[in-house]
Amino acid sequence: MKPTNKLQRRVLDLSLNYTLPINQIQKDWAYQNCLEHKGYANKTNAFCLDCGETFSHDLIYRKRAVCPNCSTRLKIENTNYRTHKQHTFFAIAEIVEEFQVIKNYELKSYHKKGEKVRYFLQPILEYWIQPNLKYTMVGLCHNLQGYCDSWGGDWSIRKERGYYHNKYEVYPRLYYPKSNFKKEYLKYGINHNLKHLTFIEAVKIAPKVPKVETLLKAKQYSLANKGNSYQLESYWPSIKICLRNKYKVKNASDWIDYIELLKYFNKDLRNAKYVCPKNLKKEHDRLVKKKRVIQEREKLERKRKKVSEAQKRYKELKSMFFGLKFSDGEIVVKVLETVQEFMEEGDVLKHCLFTNEYYNKKDSLVLSARIEEKPIETIEISLSKMKVVQSRGLNNKATEYNNRIVKLIKKNLKTIKSIKESNYTNELLAS
Ligand SMILES: [Zn+2]
């Protein structure tokens, strides 16, 4: 957009005419430090993604190698790919009149076997920051539509607006080491080492939150990025241990997750042995696994307790029928005597006997029809109506034995009724 006020006109003019263009030394620094230097290797040979030349697989030492052609130190990846692309951002800080200027650049690289790497580098966006921390943005237009993400168009004033409200927020991978920062920012630890948070974020929060200032000075940028969150507050004693031991927290979220696990296990959160693990991921994963085992055990314990309470109640309700059994010579029908049996019967016949808690139903008497100890069907009798409610086999269906089973039960309903009534009379006599 066109500048609409005096400040914007001045900033655009300064940007176009009074800033230093990027020089070759800065470009070379960016190529060297902002991109990865890799070699692609297969079983027989390898090639350097920087110069494109092939070299013998014998020169690879572990996952690293030095290119015999261009002497670049390479990280080796095992792959059959022959091309590669990289895309990154870096920044150079400069002071122009009263402004702190952060100049952001886009850097792309194209790699192909047999060819030297090609670079594409362009300035994309500048933040012009006034002493009162208000800032003006000048740069290219950031196109973000569908899969498109590119910078182009005129060099002019830019504003955040609409749906992509942080379209002009750039997180540079690195700042040029000889960048110029104002003294007032340097005193908060904001310098070319800044990572994980933008310059604007850093200068806005550091003067207000002393903990963030401390973290910036200690180069703990990932933790500093947590701003004034409750996490910084609650784990500050542990963070201080890290600072004292010069332990760098690379990923604050992972580390906080790990500290929360330590807390779960009642570990001393002020002991460097726990707080500063050599291998964070390994320790984190080990504790996650341990916690899962404990949670499983607790779940099982809760289930066991529930079953044992249910068993007590079931016994109170139905123990008068325990031991009841009748047979037609082949099929044996017996009363289920424990909640455990309900669970097993439900598992074998794949029905909802256990999950629907039939052992808790006061009016139901549940029996199992078996042939040679193997459950065939489960029968529910209504004690108030003295009749068979249902008799179901595998997957809740009736089996070929259904008629015989129901007939056998009906023949014996008398016995069940008399047990029920004698128990009723006993209760009356007892009261
Ligand atoms: Zn090379």
Image (cartoon, helix red, strand yellow):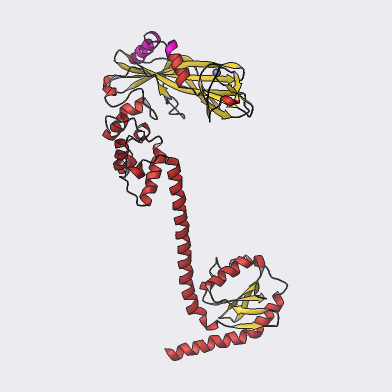
Quadrant of residue 274 within the rendered picture: top left
Q: Taking 431 as reference, is 163 above or below it?
A: above
Seen from the viewer's position, the closer of residues 3 and 333 is 333
Q: Residue at x 38, y 27 (%)?
A: 198
Q: Is residue 59 magenta?
A: no
> Is there any visible trace of residue 22 in the rendered image?
no
- Residue 361 percent coordinates (x, y): 52, 73
- Residue 162 percent coordinates (x, y): 45, 28
Which residue occupies the extreme front position in the image? Answer: 58
Q: Residue at x 45, y 52 (%)?
A: 290
Quadrant of residue 272 within the rendered picture: top left
Classify the position of ligand 1 by quadrant: top left, top right, bottom left or bottom right.
top right
In the picture, the quarter occupied by the C terminus is: bottom left
Magenta-drawn segment: 1-25
Q: Residue at x 47, y 75 (%)?
A: 313
> Is there any visible trace of residue 131 in the rendered image?
yes
Q: Taking 279 as reference, is 96 above or below it?
A: above
Seen from the viewer's position, the closer of residues 187 and 269 is 269
Which residue occupies the extreme right position in the image? Answer: 400
In the picture, the quarter occupied by the N terminus is: top left
Looking at the image, residue 3 sits to the left or right of residue 112; the answer is left
Q: Is residue 22 magenta?
A: yes
Which residue occupies the extreme bottom position in the image? Answer: 429
Seen from the viewer's position, the closer of residues 66 and 149 is 66
- Residue 217 percent coordinates (x, y): 30, 29
Tally of numbered tags? 0
Which residue occupies the extreme top position in the image? Answer: 17
- Residue 402 percent coordinates (x, y): 70, 74
Seen from the viewer's position, the closer of residues 420 and 295 is 295
Looking at the image, residue 209 sits to the left or right of residue 139; the answer is left
